[in-house]
Image: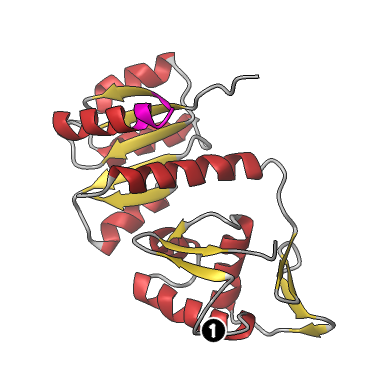
Amino acid sequence: MKRIASHLLVVDDDNRIRDLVKRYLTNAGYHVSAADGGESARKLLSQLVFDLIILDVMMPGMDGFELLRTIRLTDKTTPVIMLTARGEADARIEGLKLGADDYLAKPFEPEELALRIAAILRRVVTDENPVEEIEMSGMVFNIPREELKAGNERIKLTDGELQLLKILAKQAGEPVSREALATGSSAVVDRSVDVQITRLRKKIEPDPKDPIHIQTVRGIGYRLMPDA
């Protein structure tokens, strides 16, 4: 049976970027619709169902934040990736607090955007059958119980380490951005995420200097790779 292509909506007032993203994602096998602003996006959203929305922040009239607020009034589940030239932490956090699933700063590589889209869409499917336990080199992390054990010994985790491990474990095998990790945990800045990941590796990895479970994904963040 042929798989139905995911339907994506790209919203950006920059014709060049919008056309580039649409062409790249279409070639990647997605069905892509595009809008040049908030109002035209709202019309498409009222007529069609999308699997994921790619939303620019800095647009004239209704900006991306305002459009996202409007979307989340009636739609809490469709994933949204924000695109913006604004690199400040407060701008990233604002979008994530409004309900964005990920954040990508301009300029960006279309391949990175495609990888983030694929990761989010796979997580949506995974969420229907959530994993409860993750095994890592003899250790077992039980997500519902928030418990990391090596045999019968419970490994003590700080609140920040536990929150990061839960986020990564729920999305095992998929890259998770530093922004998403920071917003979903007590690590409120990217650098704090890196520090807590280093501490977490010391408790999990056979060799923390050569991690095999909590891997760095260059340009994005981290991913948790359980035992095969």
Specify whether residue 190 is in view.
yes
Q: Is residue 1 above or below residue 159?
A: above
Q: Residue at x 49, y 34 (%)?
A: 78
Instruction: Give percent across and percent down for residue 26.
Output: 36, 26
Quick check: 198 left or right of 206? left
Q: Position of residue 176 (x, y in %)?
A: 47, 58
Query: In the picture provided, is 164 more to the left or to the right than 133?
Result: left
Taking the image as shown, residue 38 lies to the left or right of residue 218, namely left
Label 1 Cα neighbours within 10 Å, binned few <14 / some 14-19 / many ≥20: some
Q: Quadrant of residue 9?
A: top left
Image quadrant where one finds the N terminus: top right
Relative to residue 159, is residue 65 depicted above or below?
A: above
Mark 1: secondary structure: loop
- The spot of residue 164 in percent (x, y) is 54, 69
How is the rendered protein coloured?
secondary structure
Task: Spot the residue most to the top.
Answer: 47
Q: Does the stretch in magenta take in 30? A: yes
- Residue type at numbered disc 1: Pro
**217 or 121, which is in the foreground?**
217
Label count reads: 1
Q: Which residues are magenta?
A: 25-31
Q: Is residue 99 visible?
A: no
* Residue drawn at 36 percent across, 32 percent down: 25
Q: Nearer the viewer, residue 29 or 158?
A: 29
Quarter of the rendering occupied by the C terminus: bottom right
| Residue identifier under label 1 | 208
Q: What residue do we see at 27% from left, 20% from top?
A: 40
Measured as percent of width and height from the top left, residue 220 is found at 38, 59
Q: Residue furthest right?
A: 152
Task: Report if residue 101 lies within the magenta region.
Answer: no
- Which residue is found at the position 44% from the left and 36% from the top? 72
